Image: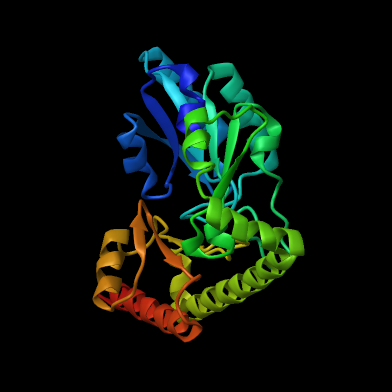
């Protein structure tokens, strides 16, 4: 839907993505004949100077950019939050270099422990499309979302004439929850539960790693679903070795680049603690070997 809304750009070649990014977005972009191109990030999200350098290099190579895909709040997998000043710089670059921004803001409402995330990046300009979902804040089976933008979104009249709308039944259910205030109660419980789970996993992992925590950039998430465990350059093992060792111990994770992503949103809390202990054991075994 968003891709159709920015079709006025014509047939362009490149979709810029954070490095690392949501692991399924690259095949999705390729399905739309776009080549994913990585942009350097740090603990505060996209680095604007790196983005600008990449844009200039692509322009010199006559490569055309259609969009930037970003997860500005509680990023997947790193859990980083894009700084407000960087958001403004990135939107300015989109105006200067003529591309759109698709902001995957499904974790926008899922801050916890009193943290207040910056407002939607879609408020900063007409080139930004904010994509959101009730699947993260209500129920995975809802499969209902919304798009917010200062830009005028258009959907083919044929869609409405044929079916009325896209998700009529589930939209009607959610509408009741929004109108009677029940959605606010559900969201508050979800935020509290995610905060408790995040703290539990973070503290258990810090304890399990002990002195070996020095080999990682371990940071406590402020929202979202994920804890990111990047390996430092001074570690006496590589991330691929750690991934292999943890797999042997039956711990579920996602390896991306120089780190491992762990989800604290689903499993029982006792399983989160057990998983952290197994990770600590795996690291200790690698350090001693």
Where residue 177 appears, as percent x and y from the top left, is 68, 63
Can you tell which quarter of the image residue 262 is in?
bottom left
Image position of 136 (left or right of 208) = right
Q: Is residue 137 above or below residue 168?
A: below
Question: What residue do we see at 58% from left, 35% from top?
Answer: 129
Q: In this view of the protein, can residue 68 be seen by the observer?
A: no
Can you tell which quarter of the image residue 14 is in?
top left
Where residue 171 appears, as percent x and y from the top left, is 58, 53
Where residue 27 appears, as percent x and y from the top left, is 31, 42
Question: What residue do we see at 36% from left, 36% from top?
Answer: 29
Question: What residue do we see at 65% from left, 61% from top?
Answer: 111
Q: Is residue 234 above or below residue 86?
A: below
Q: In this view of the protein, can residue 104 be seen by the observer?
A: yes
How many dots with numbers?
0
Where residue 162 appears, as percent x and y from the top left, is 47, 37
Q: Is residue 270 above or below residue 26?
A: below
Q: Nearer the viewer, residue 151 or 204?
A: 151
Question: What residue do we see at 71% from left, 45% from top?
Answer: 119
Image position of 84 (left or right of 277) = right
Q: Is residue 126 above or below residue 11?
A: below
Colouring mode (rainbow / by chain / secondary structure / one colour)? rainbow
The quadrant the C terminus occupies is: bottom left
Can you tell which quarter of the image residue 175 is in?
bottom right
């Amino acid at each position: 839907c968003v891709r159709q809304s920015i079709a006025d750009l014509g047939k362009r070649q490149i979709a810029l993505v954070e490095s690392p990014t949501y692991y399924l977005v690259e095949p999705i972009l390729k399905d739309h004949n776009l080549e994913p191109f990585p942009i350097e990030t740090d603990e505060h999200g996209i680095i604007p100077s790196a983005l600008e350098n990449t844009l200039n290099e692509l322009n010199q190579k006559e490569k055309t950019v259609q969009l930037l895909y970003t997860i500005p709040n509680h990023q997947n997998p790193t859990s980083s939050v894009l700084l407000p000043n960087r958001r403004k710089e990135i939107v300015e670059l989109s105006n200067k270099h003529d591309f759109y921004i698709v902001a995957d803001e499904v974790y926008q409402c899922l801050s916890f422990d009193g943290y207040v995330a910056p407002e939607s990046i879609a408020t900063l300009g007409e080139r930004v499309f904010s994509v959101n979902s009730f699947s993260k804040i209500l129920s995975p089976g809802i499969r209902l979302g919304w798009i917010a933008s200062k830009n005028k979104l258009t959907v083919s009249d044929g869609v409405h004439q044929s079916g009325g709308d896209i998700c009529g039944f589930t939209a009607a259910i959610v509408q009741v929850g929004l109108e009677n205030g029940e959605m606010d109660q559900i969201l508050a419980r979800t935020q509290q539960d995610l905060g408790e789970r995040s703290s539990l996993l973070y503290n258990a992992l810090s304890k399990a790693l002990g002195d070996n925590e020095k080999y990682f950039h371990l940071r406590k998430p402020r929202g979202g679903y994920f804890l990111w465990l990047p390996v430092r350059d001074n570690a006496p093992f590589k991330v691929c070795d750690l991934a292999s060792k943890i797999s042997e111990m039956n711990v579920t994770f996602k390896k991306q680049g120089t780190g491992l992503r762990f989800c604290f949103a689903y499993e029982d809390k006792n399983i989160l603690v057990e998983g952290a202990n197994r990770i600590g054991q795996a690291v200790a075994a690698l350090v001693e070997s």
